[in-house]
Image (tube, grey):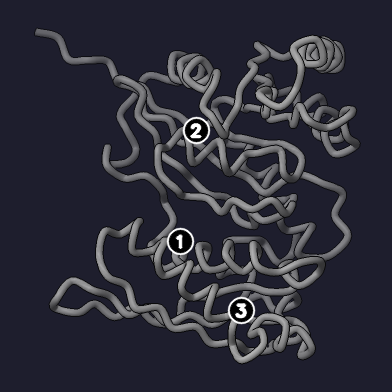
Amino acid sequence: MTDIETRCGYVALIGAPNAGKSTLINRLVGAKVSIVSPKVQTTRRRVLGVAMQGAAQIVFVDTPGIFAPKRRLDRAMVAAAWGGTEEADRIVLLVDATKKKIDQDTFAIIAGLKKTGRKALCAINKIDAVQRDKLLALAAELSALFDFERVFMISAESGDGVDDLMAEVAGSLPKGPHLFPEDQLTDLPMRMLAAEVTREHLFRQLHEEVPYALTVETDAWEEFKDGSAKVTQTIYLARDNHKAIVIGKGGSRIKQVREAAQHELQEMMGRQVHLFLFVKVRENWQEDPERYREMGLDFES
């Protein structure tokens, strides 16, 4: 009897902000490992999601959206995104089919791929919201811009076409042993994932500039004998006048965020979670190297 030949490798998902990378990686992995929000630029760190396809272990790198950076945090996020492609065995460019035309960020990413000389797959996402003739025209336009190995039509939301993309990626990975236990879904520690869950629910509640001027850190994690856990987190804001917005009238908004995040954590962990949130103003947190280390970003990018 011969041993089954295993494969393992890294696959980088890149694309413009809000192309659907986090939704796709959560579907590929089969569980939530990356923050999902209708707002752009929500993924700040490189997230590793681990998926099994037969004897192949695929380590997906969900990168921050690539866009024209204006602030230090923007530069660090974009540097993390391109850094995710350097060690990857395969690269998948995700493109939002619902945009009226190919946006400048996607043009810039394609130009960046040409500079690196790397090959890439293209996945046109959100196909369930666009007519077939428009999809074919978009695929032809993208293929004229870059010599993609293959172009896939997918819906990360519904799962359409995702299996074909998964099969293509899995079959081409290097032969070798698996890097993670088969039941491990991400490299993010649970306390970081918990902070990301709270940040996502803040993003869903808030509008305009506030989400990008906040970060969440898990300060303490206490396990109890009955299997429950007490999780204490701090929401750091860049401006004092944002505090009232985040807390809400009579504490209503922060209560909604806490309840939603606590419920999601309980669903993820399969046990009771007691979540405590504190709000603090740290006006210069976006210029604090320690905060960047906490997010897994390079302060000097």
Q: Residue at x 57, y 74 (%)?
A: 216
Percent coordinates x, y for residue 191 in the rendering = 41, 68
Disc on the earlier residue, 1 or 2: 2
Q: Secondary structure at mark 3?
A: helix
Separation of marks 1 and 3 at Cα, in angstroms: 21 Å
Q: Which residue is mark 3?
A: 253
Measured as percent of width and height from the top left, residue 107 is found at: 87, 31
- Characterize the local packing of mark 2: few (<14), some (14-19) or many (20 or more) Cα atoms within 10 angstroms: many
Above or below: residue 37 compared with residue 112: below
**Residue under circle 2?**
10
Residues packed near mark 1 inside 10 Å, few (<14), some (14 to 19) or many (20 plus) = many
Query: Where's residue 62, x and y in %?
Result: 57, 43
Q: Label 3 neighbourhood size at 10 Å, few (<14), some (14-19), many (20+)? A: some
Residue 34: percent from left, percent from top: 52, 50
Q: Amino acid at mark 2?
A: Tyr
Of all residues, the one furthest to the left in this rendering is: 1
